[in-house]
Image (cartoon, rainbow, N blue to C red):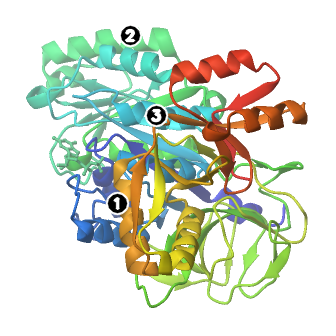
Amino acid sequence: MKYEKEINRRKTFAIISHPDAGKTTLTEKFLLFGGAIQTAGAVKSNKIKKHATSDFMEIERQRGISVATSVMTFEYKHFLINLLDTPGHKDFAEDTYRTLTAVDSVVLVVDSVNGVEEQTRRLMEVCRMRDTPVIVFINKMDRDGKNRFDLLEEIEKELSISLHPMTWPINSGKDFKGVYNLHDKSLLLFTANTKADDDSIVIEDLNSPLLDEKTGEKDAALLREDVELIDGVYGELNVNDYLNGKVAPVFFGSAINNFGVKELLDTFTRIGPTPRDRETSKREVAAGEDKFSGFIFKIHANLDPKHRDRIAFLRVCAGKFERNKYYHHVRLDKDMRFSNPYSFMARSKDVIEDAFPGDVVGLFDTGNFKIGDTMTEGEDFFFTGIPSFSPEIFKELVNKDPMKTKQLEKGISQLTDEGVAQLFTQFGGNKKIIGCVGELQFEVIQYRLLQEYGAACEFRTLPFYKACWLTSKDQKKLEDFLRYKQQNSGEDKDGHPVYLAQSEWFLNTEIQNNPDIEFHFTSEIH
Ligand code: GDP
């Protein structure tokens, strides 16, 4: 393998969580360990603080932060780690789902008080679709959380994944004494704001009086009991089960106190996957191939309306990406080169000469890219597994200024290329239908259409509940169905037919009545 050394030292992952579980705090601690930042508080939360109806500055602020923190690259113990940021707000969940296509593994943060929450569930569903390896960090052990066994059971059951504890907590809340590292057989005593460097105590034999001395007899006895139970149930972690997304190693800690974080990071660098091979429309592409290939998973518009260029985020999947070299844009069948590709170090954007599998490169784009686009050295294939999901809210896009029709069309086309929302054109009536995951996205669209394209629009709520992509082996049956259901059907931006269901009942009825048509709940973007 030509680039073996580079590939083997790279780990590309994302931290995911329900808002407030501690993703930002954990990110910051990782960056501190990586030396990418020097002080706590340097990482801005990318949360939208309130559900701001009119607070558009908040939306802009959020966009600014999410450009700056999209990818955070740092080195830790000779590894080069790319941490991809994901928006926490549920209205931007699709953005998160797409980012998950560009990582090789995730760290899931669970709040020990709240347990599994709504976003945790949905994010994990996406991870399971791709068998993404997951490490779980149970955070806020300094608070009175749920019983540790109950919590593990809840996570296993609700997220349908087997867990494997790597550390084990001694109490929680104000009685929290620390964690016992089941792998290293060392005890890590809890101290707030520790640097967590070398204050662990090795206890090869749990019966050692040292344990009683450090934790008190009662807690020592409890820990011995717990560990015996856990050892009996779990044994050694099977790393392959983790890499195949079957088993998730679990750590307990407290991000804000930088406690248990180093254990997590050390294990992540030890067992976390290096850039993985990827499926394409033609064949599997191995990360170790000589020839470059990669795909666009995110597009960001420039915040300055005078410069309409955008930044397309390219995940390198194989080979070496080089500055100023011509690559093939498969969808457009066009060769392109990039004179200013940049990487994202946590503090600054740097123009780079080359990049390797696992890396994310920022490309200036004048409108050539859509999410899901593949770049190669000439071969014709595209990376699969970058689906769009059915939106949850559907509204008709109504033009408020007929003089600006062109601007509106251009604007909505570009915004949907960016993945801000999905656009469908209804067959009967030709309505432009915008589908989003959350109300906030409609506000973003309306605001940006006006600010960036000078086009005023409003939205009219439509009674749809889900969009399903349709395929059939019998083309005639599909065409008949679409003609018959004109009001409830249309095409997505790429011309693929969709059925817009009013309710679950309607959807199930149509599925039953049309056995020759397949209803898909996600679409590959191509
Ligand atoms: P995010 O929404 O997942 O990014 O969560 P944040 O990292 O912003 O954390 C949400 C809140 O929880 C903040 O007020 C943090 O200070 C707090 N927090 C994070 N980690 C801990 C922890 O270990 N213990 C306690 N008690 N609070 C924490």
Q: Position of residue 424 (x, y in %)?
A: 61, 52
The residues bearing labels 2 and 1 have C-alpha atoms spaced at a distance of: 55 Å
Residues tagged 2 and 1 counted as in contact (Cβ below 8 A) = no
In this rendering, is residue 1 above or below 489?
Answer: below
Instruction: Give whichever of 307, 38 is nearer the camera.
Output: 307
Q: Position of residue 219 (x, y in %)?
A: 17, 17
Taking 450 as reference, is 423 left or right? right
Residue 31 visible in the picture: yes
Residue 122 shows which numbered tag? 3
Quadrant of the rendered image containing residue 45: bottom left
Residue 346 visible in the picture: no
In this rendering, is residue 328 above or below 514?
Answer: below
Viewer-nearest of labels 2 and 3? Answer: 3
Task: Give the farthest residue toward the left.
Answer: 174
Q: Position of residue 254 (x, y in %)?
A: 24, 41
Assign a secondary structure to mark 1: helix
Viewer-nearest of labels 1 and 3? Answer: 1
Name the residue located 52 percent from the left edge and 36 percent from the top edge. Answer: 134
Residue 443 shows which numbered tag? 1
Amino acid type assigned to the residue bearing label 1 in the image: Glu
